[in-house]
Image (cartoon, grey):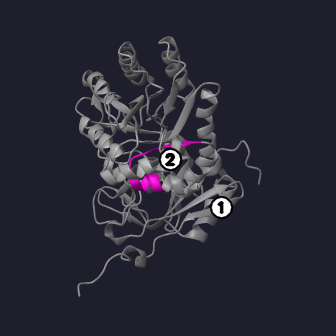
Amino acid sequence: MKTEGMAPFAYVDAVLHCEGVSLESLAQAHRTPTYVYSRRAILQAYQRYAACLAGRPALLCYAVKANSNLGVLGLLAAAGSGFDIVSEGELARTLAAGAVPDRIVFSGVGKTESEIQAALRAGIACFNVESAPELERIDRIARAAGLRAPISLRINPDVDPGTHEYISTGLKTNKFGIPAAQAEELYLRARTMAGIEIVGIDCHIGSQITNIAPYIEAAERVLDLVDRLQAHGVELRHIDFGGGLGIAYGSETTPSVEDFLAALLECVDRRGHSGKTLILEPGRSIVGNAGVLLTRIQYLKDGATKNFAIVDAAMNDLLRPALYDAWMDVWPVHARTEERRTYDIVGPVCESADWLARERSLALRPGDLLAIRSAGAYGMSMASNYNSRGRPAEVIVDGGNSHLVRQRESAADLFAGETLLP
């Protein structure tokens, strides 16, 4: 089957396919629930960013927290991506996937001593520092190792990104970053520290942002600080504007990568900083629409006021609906023409929060397969073993071929590291 030009997920003869492979065949081969990703969709999303930044100093650092599967990381590393990490585990994953250490930035508010030591040994590009105590800790550890740690300060610009409160990171009430009013003084302190090398400045205001205006407002405030630092003789090599660009889960309108970067680059160039390296940390916008969660209906149940489609995926497999009240589109793998009914799509976990979609008009039969759309980001990476449920398998489709990139967890896997009392 020719797949060039096709959407990554499309119906062929009334059966939903990922590229050139039917989701029915993947369910037969790997059972359900299973995450399925399109290789082509991931690379196309990454290359849209890269094309907009061609010809100028820039580094794209994929946000590993969005989807940390080694197959996904290896694909992006081979394409030239850097990585934005938030833990020692993510550092190990990116290195195992072939990442170049000096294309890794380390974010996060709670870096431990062992994490800082591991990142210094690896030779990462930069620590995005989120507090004065963290800066002091990095300085102490670097001096003890006879090194200088490359750092930027993450600025909290107090800008409302207009997103869900749990994924807003740039307001003064959030735990993230250093208030802009305090950052200038902290940069001047950092300049005196023997274990610190100042290389840049960082900002990240949130996730699933669907409006360009908050980005530009934050960028202007960061660039104001850059100008003040330059007046003090503090020269920065890079400016990191973070990530957070939203995707369309349903009918919402989102900015294109091209429009977003055009506005950001215009701001940088107008302010006279086009010679500095621009770092971006996209995550969801790279992998979100490249994946689905494949699940099978176990029962159709008529309730007193609702109809339920009970599936074998649950909130432990896909937490976004329960955690954020997130809307996820649902596609039947087999398109049916019979009469539709309104269903809540729910899982088997013993929580009323265990739902994947509500009030959906669908033509369903017991045993049907469903694909939960736009599940490539913050799906498997947030999965757990709640109710002693093994996490799903993960598959990457490449044209007419599919590759199992994570085996389904077995019951024995769940307690492999546990012991009975003697």
From this view, report whether residue 26 is shown above or below residue 284: below
Magenta region, residue range? 81-92
- Residue 262 appears in the figure: yes
Q: Nearer the viewer, residue 202 or 412?
A: 202
Q: Position of residue 90 (x, y in %)?
A: 44, 53
| Relative horizontal placement of residue 81, taking residue 253 as reference (left or right) | right
Tell me, yes or no, whether the highlighted magenta stretch contains residue 302.
no
Q: Earlier in the sequence, mark 1 or mark 2?
A: 2
* Nearer the camera: disc 1 or disc 2: 1
Q: Quadrant of the C terminus?
A: bottom left
Q: Is residue 297 above or below residue 159?
A: below
Please, what secondary structure does the residue beneath circle 1 have?
strand
Residue 247 pos. (x, y %): 49, 37
Residue farthest to the front? 146
Residue that label 1 marks: 402
Residue 374 bears which disc, if any?
Answer: 2
Tag 2 secondary structure:
loop
The quadrant the N terminus occupies is bottom right
Amino acid of disc 1 = Ser
Q: Residues within 10 Å of mark 1 (few under 14, many from 20)?
A: some
Q: CA distance from mark 1 to mark 2?
A: 19 Å
379 in relation to 211, above or below = below
Q: Percent position (x, y) of residue 97?
A: 56, 55
